[in-house]
Image (cartoon, helix red, strand yellow):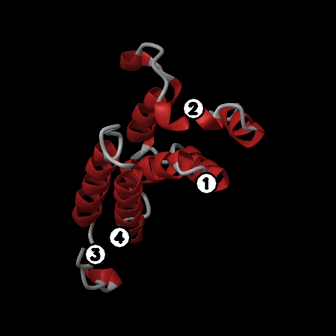
């Protein structure tokens, strides 16, 4: 896959970040297909991670990229990275402009509201981790 040329900071935008986060989310969704061979699923997750990181470079406050990068890391067993990003999400929650987006992601993570007890499966393996459990006490 061809890499896009790096953009200078002043050339980046919130819109670019959202587009990259959306692309990453689509890749992450594709990687869930059990019909795909494991190497292909891993390749898709790796591509998703790159998109999320680039999105956060363009807009460090992008909640969608933050949450889904945490989910990606949880999937590939990078527990501390996932916990760090969820902690970042907790801090973003304090910003009035970001709070509704963060709450929506927390609803998904914790199975609240429209998710009716369906916990986000990306984080299943983290739920027994003491770092994850301690962080959840702060939400």
**Label 1 vs label 3: CA separation?**
28 Å
The mark that comes first in sequence, 4 or 1, is: 4
Q: Which residue is mark 3?
A: 12
- At horizontal 53% and vertical 47% (from top left) the residue drawn is 89
Q: Which mark is residue 124?
A: 2
Residue 41 location (% of width, % of height): 37, 51
**Residue 102, picture quadrant:** top left
Q: Is the residue under label 2 in contact with that under label 4 (CB below 8 Å)?
A: no
Callout 2 secondary element: helix
**Label 4 vs label 3: CA separation?**
5 Å
**Label 4 vs label 1: CA separation?**
23 Å
Query: How many C-alpha atoms fall within 10 Å of the one at disc 4: few (<14), some, or many (≥20)?
Result: many
Q: Is the residue under label 3 in contact with that under label 4 (CB below 8 Å)?
A: yes
Q: Which residue is mark 1?
A: 78
**Label 3 vs label 2: CA separation?**
34 Å
Q: Is the residue under label 2 in contact with that under label 3 (CB below 8 Å)?
A: no
Q: Is residue 32 above or below residue 20?
A: above
Q: Which residue is mark 4?
A: 58
Residue 126 location (% of width, % of height): 63, 38
């Amino acid at each position: 896959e061809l890499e896009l040329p790096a953009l200078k900071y002043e050339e980046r935008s919130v819109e670019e970040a959202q587009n990259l986060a959306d692309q990453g989310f689509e890749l992450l969704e594709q990687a869930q297909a059990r019909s795909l061979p494991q190497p292909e699923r891993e390749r898709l997750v790796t591509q998703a991670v790159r998109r999320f990181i680039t999105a956060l470079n363009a807009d460090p406050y992008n909640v969608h990229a933050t949450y889904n990068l945490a989910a990606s890391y949880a999937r590939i067993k990078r527990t501390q990275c996932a916990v760090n990003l969820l902690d970042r999400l907790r801090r973003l929650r304090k910003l009035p402009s970001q709070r509704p987006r963060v709450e929506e992601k927390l609803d998904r993570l914790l199975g609240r509201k429209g998710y009716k007890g369906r916990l986000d499966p990306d984080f299943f393996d983290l739920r027994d981790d003491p770092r994850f459990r301690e962080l959840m006490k702060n939400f």
